Amino acid sequence: LIGVSTMLARSMQRLGRTGSRLMSGAPGSEKIAMVGSGNFGSALVRILGANAKRHAVFDDEVRMYVYEEMIDGKPLTEIINTTHENVKYLKGAKFTPNVRAVPDLAEAVKGATMVCFCLPHQFLKPLMPIIKASVAPGAKCLSAIKGIDFDDKGVVLISDLLRDGLNADVSVLMGANVANDMASDQFCETTIGYKDEKNGELFRLAFDAPALKVGTVKDTVGVELCGALKNIVAIGAGYSDGLGYGGNTKAALIRIGLKEMIKFCKMFYPNAGIDDNTFLESCGVADLITTCFGGRNRKCAEAYAKANKTKSLEQIETEILAGQKLQGTLTAKEVNHILKMKGLEHEFPFFTTVYKISYEDAPFSALTETPY
């Protein structure tokens, strides 16, 4: 009887790994690739690697496209594949051995059915033809890219660039996810916005983990805009810190910034089905809070304010970020371009002030003297 009980228990364990998720696809049918290997991308890949081994629907191997560079005389991809660690962008955090760093983009995404993106959005467009030619037919995508683009008509979402360029369904992942905290498996949450519910569930399965609770909402636009716009607010919060202001001032700026985030979303995407509850998800107020108290945008903005513009933003980016890119100031510039184009700068005084301090001759005192 003991032997029968043991066999039954083992059978149930196998069913727990496969049976409950068979509706998502045949075992090993979903092949995951990550385009991007920076700080946040590496933190996400740690989770993808572990979950690929945990859930039978996923192929065991997770490939990560890495822009090749030399570290102490060795290729970064070789170091990652040997030590299972991205020693440049996420030092001290180990990948599972099934994560493979690949310097050739076409090879990295070859045959992939689920392609995740986490890289500075200004580098995305030239990569898409290669990706489209290499992924599996019908591949689905997820963007963890925090930024926006624009054309002569106005705002262009990164997810729309991917949809148009790859002819694919695109979900988005945004949340209160400072990569270095994630690397030490501190509990956090994130939000996946989806259009196709089945694909949203597959990506939830790929990212949900004991230390990362994934919520899902059918609102890609709201989730994505929150992830981009909060970086502008974080620049303002960093300026506040650099000027020596306390918690009251920062709290006021966060509140003002959140109001402008919501207003921007509703004004530019009135018919996109943006749900007010999205702003209460991890991608909304939670991400805004953590970004205004930690993260690269706040840190660099604080340094810029302390230097009183004697150093350029580019200098500070180079000194502090060690190869990473500052997102908030670029987003402020892109948003301001759109606001100027539409004659709407006066409708968004906080966004406009952050831009003018960052790129024009507005003094830091404008942060608290501008009527909001």
Image: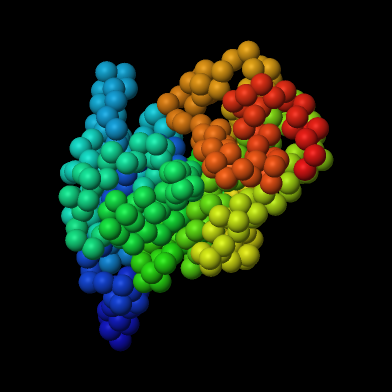
Give the camera-side residue of 340 and 61.
340
Look at the image and name its color scheme: rainbow
**Residue 90 showing in the rendered view:** yes
In the rendered view, tell whether residue 15 sits above or below residue 294. Answer: below
Which image quarter holds the C terminus? top right
The image position of residue 270, as x and y in percent, is 57, 62
Write the residue at 28% across / 38% down.
Answer: 126
**Residue 15 showing in the rendered view:** no
Write the residue at 74% across / 48% down.
Answer: 255
The image position of residue 278, as x and y in percent, is 59, 62
Write the residue at 45% across / 50% down.
Answer: 157
Give the camera-side residue of 270 and 290.
270
Task: Give the number of marks.
Answer: 0
The image position of residue 7, as x and y in percent, is 27, 79
Which image quarter holds the N terminus? bottom left
Q: Kindly indicate the quadrant of the structure image that contains residue 340.
A: top right
Write the residue at 28% across / 67% down.
Answer: 57
Q: Kindly indicate the quadrant of the structure image that contains residue 348.
A: top right
Q: Kindly indicate the quadrant of the structure image that contains residue 335.
A: top right
Left or right of residue 304, residue 65 in this image = left
The image position of residue 83, as x and y in percent, is 31, 35
- Judged from this view, the residue extending furthest toward the top is 310
